[in-house]
Image (cartoon, grey):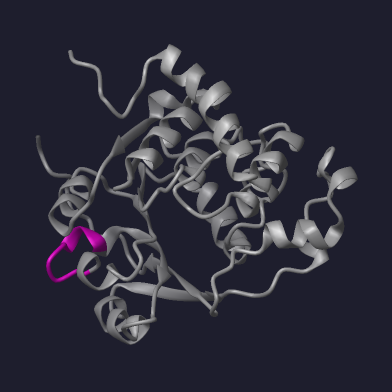
Amino acid sequence: MPRDPDDPSLPGWLLYRFVHVPWNALRERNADFLLYLLLGGRVSGGPFAGLRYVGNSPNPHIGPALLGTYEMELRPFLQRLLAQDFDVFVDIGAAEGYYAVGWARFGRAPRVIAYEGDRLGRVLTRFMARRNGVAGKLDMRGFCDPAALAEVLAPFQRPVLLVDIEGLEATMLDPALNPHLARTTLLVELHEHELAMGDLLRPRFASTHTIEEAWSTPRTGEDLPRRTGLARWLFSRDRLLQFADETRGQKMRWWLLTPKASPARPAAQG
């Protein structure tokens, strides 16, 4: 079987981790990479505390993930979901793998399927899965479209789906086109800079799901993890708060959509 180009060999992984990432971080004066080193390469708080991380990302910075404050408004939702017996966790828009690998390590679902269009993100997610000993649970894929989503949900009775796709929720999440969504628990970030996404999606799910909502809030010193290792000696509290800032530029909201009743429908064959 030919090797997946998104899954580099062990020498490639070693070169990436110990040569490429440190060199780029030094060249770009990347303070997030220094934070990564000072925290021992692990997430220091939140639902995935202890997760072995990677020192790079397709996103602007990884400070919030490292401090465990990334999307901390979702913690009550995540704590409930991680304890449930879903048969698959599907992540659309995985970036470097915070949720995909975090769920593979701390969740109860036996399988994780992650989609990410950026090749760097796919490589990093695989690296992180290896670092955490969960590579066997992770199925890493590229772009996802509505047809691919319907196909991936079809065999499962209790799927949970995380969606962060920068405004494409309108085309991806339509139960009229994808009836498998009716039995799916969804955690969706609503991107409303162009469309009133909530007004668009609510009628689609009102009859099948209970909708709970969380809004983004500013980070404060109380949100920082208690243990920050060597970082607390080098960085001030204000600087750590800057790392924790997700720099979104506007208030965001998320929905947790829980099926009101699980349709008694057999899984697809084949």
Q: Residue furthest front?
A: 27
> Residue 247 falls in which quadrant of the image?
bottom right
Q: How many marks?
A: 0
Q: Which residues are magenta?
A: 174-181
- Quadrant location of the C terminus in the rendered image: top left
Instruction: Give the residue displayed 64% in from the left and 51% down from the top.
Output: 63
Please identify the dominant SS of the magenta region.
Answer: loop
Above or below 91: residue 262: below
Instruction: Give the residue displayed 86% in from the left and 45% down from the top.
Output: 234
18 sits to left or right of 262: right
109 sits to left or right of 240: left
74 sits to left or right of 40: left
Q: Position of residue 249 (x, y in %)?
A: 55, 76
- Quadrant location of the N terminus in the rendered image: top left
Instruction: Give the residue displayed 49% in from the left and 47% down from the top.
Output: 99
> Residue 8 falls in which quadrant of the image?
top left
Q: State the residue in front, 145 or 212.
A: 145
Q: State the residue in front, 175 or 68.
A: 68
Instruction: Give the residue displayed 40% in from the left and 48% down from the top.
Output: 94
Q: State the residue in front, 42 or 262.
A: 42
Q: Position of residue 54 (x, y in %)?
A: 56, 35
Above or below 237: residue 27: above
Q: Residue furthest left?
A: 270
Q: Position of residue 183 (x, y in %)?
A: 28, 59
The stretch drawn in magenta includes residue 262:
no
Q: Position of residue 181 (x, y in %)?
A: 25, 61
